[in-house]
Amino acid sequence: MSDGPLVVQSDKTLMIEVDLPGAAECRNAIAAFAELERAPEHVHTYRITPLGLWNARAAGMDAKSVMDALTTFSRFPVPASLLADLTETMGRYGRLVLEKDPSHPLVLRSCDRAVLEEVLGSRLTAGMFGPRLDAERVVVLLGERGRLKQALLKLGWPADDQAGYVDGTRHAISLREEGGFALRAYQSEAVDVFMASGSGTVVLPCGAGKTLVGLAAMARCSASTLILVTNTVSARQWRSEIFAHSSVTEEQIGEYSGERKEIRPVTVATYQILSTRSKGEYRHFGVFDAQDWGLVIYDEVHLLPAPVFRMTAEIQSRRRLGLTGTLVREDGREGDVFSLIGPKRFEAPWKLMEEQGWIAPALCTEVRVTLSDAERMTYALTEAAKRHSVASTSAAKDRAIEFLVRKHDGEPTLVIGMYLEHLSRIADMLQAPLITGKTPVLERERLYDAFRSGKERVLVVSNVANFSIDLPDASVAVQVSGTFGSRQEEAQRLGRILRPKADRRQARFFTVVSRDTNEQEFAARRQRFLAEQGYPYEIVDAEDLVGV
Amino acid sequence: MTADIQVRSLGDELAGWDASRLAALLLRRPDIAGPDAPRDVGELAERAQDLASLRDAIAGCTLAESRLLQVIVCCARDCTQDELAAALPDGSALCDVEKVLLSLEQCAFIWRYGGRIYSSSALRTAVPTRFGPPVRALLEAQTAEYAKHVLRILQAETHARGVTLRASTREVTGRPLRKAEVIDDIESILTTPGAVPALLEGASADDRELAIELSSSTHGLRSAHLYFSPYSRPGYYSQSRGYWLFERAMLLPGMDGAAYEPREVGVALCGKAVDDLAVDEPELAVGEVDASSVEIAAGSRAASLLDSVDDLLEAWGEEPVAELKTGGLGVTAIKKAATLLEMSVRDATRLVEFLYLAGLIESSIVVRKEGRHAVYDRLIAPSSAAAGWLNREPVVRWRELAGAWLRADRWPSMPAREVHGDDAAKRIPVTGSQFANDASALRRDVLASLASLDGRPSIDGDDERSGRGTQWLAPSTTLKALAEHLYWERPQRWLNKNGIEPFELVEWTYEEAEMLGIVAQGRLSSMGAALLGGDNSRAQQALAACWPEETVKFTVQADLTAVVIGRLSRSVLVELRLLADRESQGAASIFRFSEASLHRAIASGRDPDTIMDFLKRHSSKGVPQSLSYLVGDVARRHGHIEVGSAASFVISKDPAVLADACVHRRTRKLGLCQLAPTVAVSALGPDKVVSVLREAGFLPVSAETSGTPSDSPVPKEIDSIRRSLGGVVALQSATASGASKGLPEPFRSQPSAQRSARVNLRAWAVQSGYHLGEQPVKLSQRSARELAEQLLAGPAGRRGGKRTASGSSSGRLPPRQRSR
């Protein structure tokens, strides 16, 4: 038994005692092949998954280096079965290779005939192949590259895609490193790793500058770029960032949204417009072919809607960069992100970023309010499906919300919720502007600008502000209701206040929850991602708020 | 058919052996040296050709020896080396099998002389092949007349078809042939290349088809009626199926009534006796393992096993489990045990079997009464030996458990074997009846092979694709290789195990041994090796040396998990398992606190202070606020609803009356407990309560649990009153009749109260003995809000020969009733 900080379990979980010497080296060694599952204050848990091992293999690691990392840092003997299993799993990657052929655009090659036969005979790959060239190679039909990769992943034989990428229309883009702006080391590293492979996902905490990673990737590709974002406000924020930090001019940027349909060398399109169906067709998918894109950026890739996935399967020859703060898909489609956008290429734990000062330190507090007797009776008599709404919009919360906002008077504060009537009531109570999906985009932008400039200190916002909204000064968030147990929503909302503050003050995140209701259970589930990222929630009673 | 061939007997052969060769023979076949030493080599040769001795010796042959023997016995007797070379599978040459031939010679199975390979008739019978029995064995059961008849036919037909027969090794004497000589000649004809196909050319299509069908089967033809009699009428028996083949010794009756195609015919039709000689010993790929890690892992396994055993004995001691009528434990009981022990059903099955083997659990019969009958329940519970076992040192307990397993003549994994379809009915229940007389020996073989791995070089190479790492090898890969190796070494030993493949038996042994800590990381542990060698004391010492260190500390985190690195001391572990649910276990364990787990702890008698005290004492890094809050919150909500037991309840609208009833001297024996001003409960049944209250001067009515006065059987004294009513007194409650007209005001204005009033007036009247025609009475009813109410009822009139009544909850009757 050594003194290593790592414990390797036969169920493929790895635990690092972060307080022990060597923990940081150990974390660096295993991060390449193991997925961080939770990172609370003392023991971080990673999991070795086939996807993680294939990611590592794709990045050039072999089984021996994985084993060495485990055995070097492990305190107890590493289970032999686990070592053998990971060797076998890693050996599965690369037995099938997608590559170009002088006479065919795309072929699937395998040096293992049995594997090739298994894949060719599978129902999942039916209709994706052309003629067989020889015992080791088969032609892949045009347009099936993405779907084939998805199918191969499901079959447990992930393909090594060496078919390369098209360069796209050349369009010189350079970063303007002025006014103190420069890429941070981790951002540069993320771009390097991405460019080395040509497709993949970069996971950085909210507020850690994912947009800049995208910008740097654009500069490195220097080709026409399609950027897919969640909504129009986000699209405009991307526009501003591109103007601010790159050589791209206003004429070169187009917006493809519900309001405008511009296709320019750099085009920012929204998921909303792409997912819009008219007469059963996705009429805006043409944007993918409107230019010879050299790079496609997917912002908030964890929210990528299913139709865009389908379209992405058909543009596998273009470089693709996924950006997200939380690679947690509530629909469990992480595998599709792996095969269609690309493997996770770079990830930085939230607390590590916080330690290094790239994101603001945050303190999370759950405030529990007690419903009045009348509300309790109403809640008890309400049918199950509506109870969450009753609990979330309880009048008992109002006093606590008001107290919290007044307590942080002067600090830029966001009050975030999902039930519009309740938000409207709160906005009236606080005499603060309300932004919902119905608020016109111009009005939203005006209010956000007012908030950024300090004219408005409190904004009451609905789900529209969950993500992609850059409000650098916001330092207090009061969450009054949320979408049931969504972990990524909780993390994204915290992300709104994580931009480092000039005065280095701590961000405060409050979530107001009705006691003894199902909201309390949902809150526990929502907090799990952040708790696992090392954000402990303090729980206080609304009655004790005076001490907060 | 004669030739100048030198025949040599085994005796002559052995006479030429030197002492060291003879010693090696006796070492390989010790049975022929006893019980008394053979007087000369002749007797030794005789013993070496004894059928029983040969069978024993063949059981100890390697796969290569066994397969080559099959080839030899399928060749002609005393075949030449060329004939043997031709009979080898494609791609094999004599030089490839020379080493195996030498080994067979050393065992005195065969001997070579003058370019020929000799073997005894007994060997040809003893060696099992994929064909039928040898023709000699089948013909010996037939008459000499039949043999001669067959020989005549064979000679005539082969001659007619131009087949050149093999040269005979027998001298020509001119005397009539003896039966044995006839059999020799028949055997010689059937082993002559091309003879059998030539003979079959004269057969009918049916016979030819039958011959081909039987050629690749060891099963005979059932219900064959093949008889030969020189005195029977021609054609009498010849109508039987296969008779044509029978007349040519190509289908002969066996001792079991079925007819078999002789081996020689099968070989002639199928070609080769075996497809592969398996000459080379399979490579036993060995992964590199750190010896110290084997010991640590084994010690950890052993400690974990003892914990599980303790848990199970404790649980079954408190609540024994029911045994199946057919014996053993059912799936439900094992699944429950698996949940309790937080292990797979497969492992739980093995664990229970270990306890059974060590005599720590036993079946007993418990008698209980069900009505007038005695019911006999068969239960499985800790045995009387278990108490003593639990008090011993852990190393001793482990040694006894592991020793019992090593000696056991059953497979603990057998009940966990997956069986499907028709075989499902053959599932053996846990601790049920099964017996495998060689289980212990096979188990020891596997462990001995594992012990021998240490001496072997580990595999190397970078062939990741084959699943072999540079230095690591999965136990499953080793096991497969091990099973192949063990099978190659002694194939006969692993056959006929009720359809269980050798690999499965090796895997069972390994997994069972791994659970016990006898093996770990694919190797035999020191304690396992000592146990295998019978050195119990050294086994215990070895376990003591690798017994995992215990800790009493764990780390509690804000995400409501507790992480235990290493082995937690049992008392702390038991408490922690009560407070939290285990999510992961191994070298480290993760426990998660939740509302449910804390509820469980509080329900078990822990209070928040005790819980927090425990956590603070054992948490190495403090207790996060979120957990303290959760403990307090759960404690606050705990017990919002309380459930108790009571046999009857007493309700009264008048709190004063109820209070009086509760404290009355004559009702003390009821033990009335007042839950609310108008509700009390008693542990005695309703009949008794009514009776005692009545004796005390109260006027109770009996009510069902719904609050409705019951329609229970009428006591005798009440029955007499009923008769005194002089007719049917049918009463309807005003609410039940649905007619609100004429009702008192309170009822008219409260339709819901009317609807919910479910009063069985008749029963009440009869039970309470009141006559509605004479005086108003108090009635109990349950209101719309499910509250007990009383109302005053009086007769309302007559309708259809029945009296009707109406009532009021105001305590005053309507004027008309009062006037009456």
Image: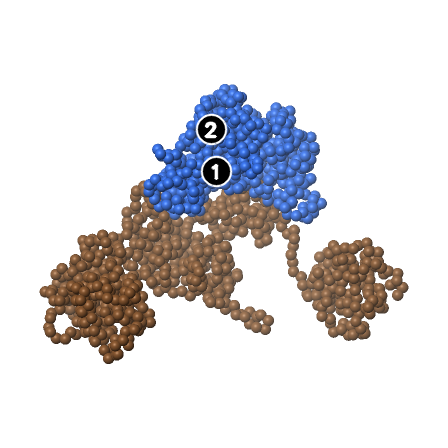
Chain colours: A blue, B brown
B353 w.r.t. A63: above or below? below
Q: Quadrant of the C terminus of chain A?
A: top right
Q: Tell me the SS state at disc 2.
A: loop
B764 w.r.t. B679: above or below? below
Is the same chain shared between marks 2 and 1?
A: yes
Residue closest to the eye, B467 or B507: B467
Name the residue at 49% across, 65% down.
B323
> Is A233 left or right of A431, judged from the image as shown?
left
Question: Which residue corresponds to mark 1?
Answer: A337
Residue closest to the eye, B298 or A211: A211
Observer-side mark, 2 or 1, equals 2
Question: Which residue corresponds to mark 2?
Answer: A293
Q: Is residue A78 visible?
A: no
Q: Is residue B803 visible?
A: yes
Name the residue at 30% across, 57% down.
B487
Q: Position of residue B525 (x, y in %)?
A: 35, 52
Q: Position of residue B213 (x, y in %)?
A: 30, 63
